[in-house]
Amino acid sequence: MKYKVVIGTLFVDGVKYRRGDIIETDQDLGTRVEPVVEVAVEEKPKPKRKRRTKAEIEAEAILSDIPAIGGSNEDR
């Protein structure tokens, strides 16, 4: 089981651990450690970046200049 060290320093099997370190052991260490529950982290795939060519940008600019059918609301 995994535990987190809650005291300043802890020696387990000749290895020194500091406060906040996570260790995996089967020994009973009492109040010097607290159990750690692992949270399952689901990684979401990053969306792919859409590349735009110069032709696409120019075509979009031309289409935005064309007035909509039925006139505009500027007259009212």
Image (cartoon, rainbow, N blue to C red):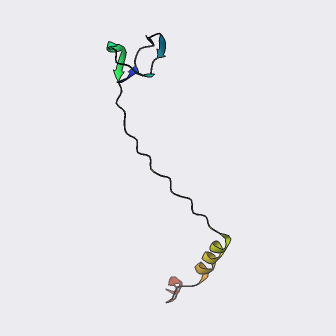
Which residue is found at the position 59% from the left and 84% from the top?
66
Where is residue 13? Give x, y as percent.
Answer: 44, 11
Residue 59 lies in what quarter of the image? bottom right
Q: Nearer the viewer, residue 4 or 71?
A: 4
Residue 30, percent across and down? 32, 13
Q: How many marks?
A: 0
Please state, as top left, top right, bottom left or bottom right, where the N terminus lies in the image.
Answer: top left
- Residue at the (40%, 18%) spot, across then down: 6
Query: Does residue 69 appear left or right of residue 4 in this picture?
Result: right
**Would residue 30 appear left or right of 6 to someone viewing this image?**
left
Depicted 55 relative to depicted 69: above or below: above
Q: Residue at x 41, y 14 (%)?
A: 7
Q: Relative to 7, say whether 39 is above or below.
A: below
Q: Position of residue 53 (x, y in %)?
A: 65, 69
Task: Tell me what residue is drawn at x 40 percent, y 45 percent.
Answer: 42
Location of residue 58 by image quarter: bottom right
Q: Nearer the viewer, residue 72 or 76?
A: 72
Q: Position of residue 49 (x, y in %)?
A: 56, 59
- Between 62 and 11, the one lying in front of the other is 11
Is residue 68 placed above or below 1 in the rendered structure?
A: below
